[in-house]
Amino acid sequence: MASKPRIQPVIALTLAQEAPLTEALEAYFAKCEEKLGMVPNVLRAYAFNPVKLQAFADMYNDLMLGDSGLSKLEREMIAVVVSAANRCFYCLTAHGAAVRQLSGDPELGELMVMNWRAADLDARHRAMLEFAWKLTREPDAVEEADRQALRDAGFTDRDIWDIASVIGFFNMSNRVATATDMRPNGDYHAQAR
């Protein structure tokens, strides 16, 4: 007899919904279903508080989808490296899938998750990801030479701002996801393989 798949809670905390979702957030969830085929569990986790959910979604959408000198793939690569440094299961799973999809290269996605330094990266991406790793692991050691290495790799000062902002956002997200034992949607595991 086949066993039923185990339904995993989204997070390890039991949070009562403080208010119903706004019409705009309901539309956002519907758009996620339409474009992704699911509502990411990180959004479901924040849904207990529509104000927090809206703030999270606004910041995520600005950093990851807004105008930037960084490509979507580059932003996802940063998310994976930060999440690897922090060993965040949720973000490694979700953003590893995004790297596989955006790059069209499943092997790159897996290398990024397992050991990004083993990936065949150009000098621009290597500099960007070295900065992401250092700012995550040794923020007090970041100095002008690190910013100059990014400039030397072709990044503008505005790009450096965007790189730092993505790094900061995912350090925050990783800590919330880890603290609450946030679980990724199962769909991520099979995407773009």
Image (tube, rainbow, N blue to C red):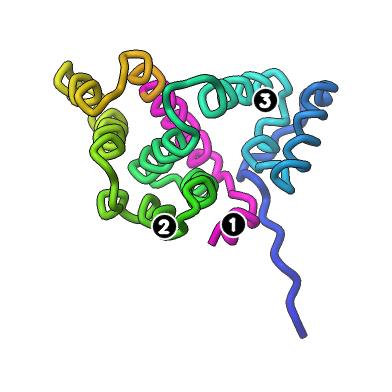
Quick one: SS at disc 1? loop
* Residue bearing mark 3: 53
Quick one: SS at disc 2? helix
Q: Are dots 3 and 2 in contact, CB under 8 Å?
A: no
Q: Nearer the viewer, mark 1 or mark 3?
A: 1
Task: Please check the rendered image and state whether residue 183 is part of the magenta-colored stretch, yes or no.
Answer: yes
Give the residue drawn at x 72%, y 30%: 48
> In this rendering, would 49 be left or right of 160?
right
Q: Mark 3 or mark 2: which comes first in sequence?
A: 3
* Residue bearing mark 2: 110
* Residue bearing mark 1: 191
Q: Tell me residue 138's x, y (percent).
A: 23, 30
Q: Amino acid at mark 2?
A: Glu
- The local crowd at label 1, few if under 14, some if 14 to 19, many if 20 or more residues have their Cα within 10 Å, is some
Q: Amino acid at mark 1?
A: Gln
On residue 41, which mark appears?
A: none
Q: Tell me residue 43's x, y (percent).
A: 67, 35
Q: Amino acid at mark 3?
A: Leu
Furthest residue to the top?
157
The part of the chain drawn in magenta is: 164-193
Quick one: SS at disc 3? helix
Q: Tell me residue 26's x, y (percent).
A: 82, 29
Task: Please check the rendered image and state whether residue 81 is part of the magenta-colored stretch, yes or no.
Answer: no
Give the residue drawn at x 69%, y 45%: 36
Q: Quadrant of residue 124?
A: top left
Give the residue drawn at x 23%, y 28%: 153
Q: Mark 1 or mark 3: which comes first in sequence?
A: 3
Q: Are dots 1 and 3 in contact, CB under 8 Å?
A: no
